[in-house]
Image (cartoon, helix red, strand yellow):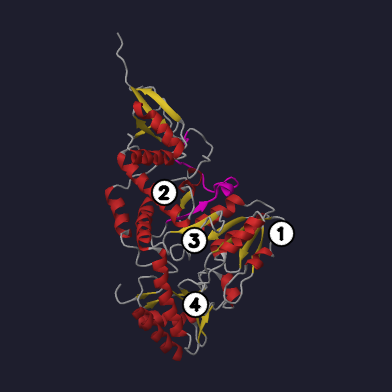
Amino acid sequence: MPMEQEIQYYVLFPNHDNGMRLHRELKKKGLSSVIAPTPRQASKCCGISLLIKEEETDAVKDVIEEADIETLGIAQIKKDVNPNRDRYC
Amino acid sequence: MDNFIYFDNGSTSFPKAPGVAEAVGHLLMHGAFNINRGSYEGAYEVAEMVLDTRERLARLFHGGDSRRVIFTPGITWSLNMLLSGFLRAGDHVIVSGMEHNAVMRPLYRLTKAGITYSVAQADGEGYVAPEAVECEIRPNTRLVLMLHASNVCGTILPIREIGDICRKHRLFFAVDTAQSAGSIPVDMEVAGIDFLAFTGHKGLKGPQGIGGFLISDRLDEEMQPAILGGTGSRSDSLEQPDMLPDKYESGTMNLPGIAGLNAALVYLEETGIEVIAKKKTELTRMFLEGVKEIPGVRVVGKQGCEGRTAVVSLDFQRQDNALAAFQLEQEYGVMTRVGLHCAPQAHKSLGTFPKGTVRFSFSENNTSEEIGHCVEAIKKIAEK
């Protein structure tokens, strides 16, 4: 029987600048935000992404709108390593 | 170097603001990681510092969204990026009669590519009346570009009124703040500035090699980046990203320079530009009072403290200005800049071309004792 895989939530960005801005805003609001390299399966961007908590995704969306941050959406990624991932950087 | 008096802050400020050298050294010694590339905590900390610097600059210049703050090596780069990235064959540009070669040389070159320009004439004090700009407008005029304050004689140009003219005629307005940023308030919004070029190493009191520009959305829509390359974003595409600041920031940035500039901006915010300006004005007033009655020495440009920065040019009428500057340095330890100050256009307007002037430019770190010493030195040199 296959094991259930943990789902992680990543906010994706077109560039680093927007990622850093949202990270700063989330910290100000006391919301969890960990800067991480974007999983290759989620985006072709070399940029950073923000690892957030599932239960805070709605609050994060509100901050994105309030702070006028450009994102590429929030991706749900299974926590595993794909050795055949895309490599662009 | 001990026992010298530094009056060449118009070239570059010295000493730098407290904390600048430490900030540059700290970054280099403890984590000169690359932003937009490195995927580790140290790089993110540097990225936070860069973002903080953008926000401080946006506040300083009232530039709005700090994504529109772009870093370059300095104003010359910024102006070249504007001129080559914005103008097209057939466009007409208006500049002032006080411009630096950072404007005039790239613009002159562009005349060979079908771009024309007119010069809004300055008066004998280096002032450019708004009407002088308005009367140069042609049907194909697209840009008005001028410095905020003269690097030769310190005269402040009326950018607010000229900005109004640009709004009225729907022209883009670009301002070179080399001699005003950090010395007097500059408000991008009030003056309707579309492109504000700044350098970090003069009035902002940061290190050399870092500067940039702030750009309006409407200008950004019509401007192309002059330098293309890696930005750490959309790396799968051969198209240059069109989002800010990536569009204009290809290649690794001068992060030690930005760290130093950040420390300088902290100092400026804590001290207050008005406080700095007041101190500089007092020193300038004392200097002008001291030299105005010296026979054989002429103050070039405005004679008083109104409408000027702490940059003063003198013409030693009975001798070679270079020799006077040499004596000031060799015999009295006063460091100045002599010549044309990379601004032959301005010297022509002021009637000091090609002889040039001896320029004295003060900072808030200078003292009244230094001014007194220098005035006495000028008296003795002028007597010879």
Q: Nearer the viewer, residue A43 or B338?
A: A43
The residue pinned by badge 1 equals B138
Q: Are marks 2 and 3 on the same chain?
A: yes
Number of residue marks: 4
**Mark 4 vs mark 2: in front:** 4
Secondary structure beneath dot 3 equals loop
- Is B225 magenta? The answer is yes
Between discs 2 and 3, the one toward the N terminus? 3
Mark with earlier residue (4, 1): 1
Subunit of label 3: B
Q: Which residue is mark 2?
A: B253
* Distance between mark 2 and mark 3 Cα atoms: 25 Å
The residue that label 3 is drawn on is B186
Q: Quadrant of the N terminus of chain B?
A: bottom left
Sequence-earlier tag: 4 or 3: 3
Mark nearer the N terminus (1 vs 3): 1
Q: Residues within 10 Å of mark 3 (few under 14, many from 20)?
A: many
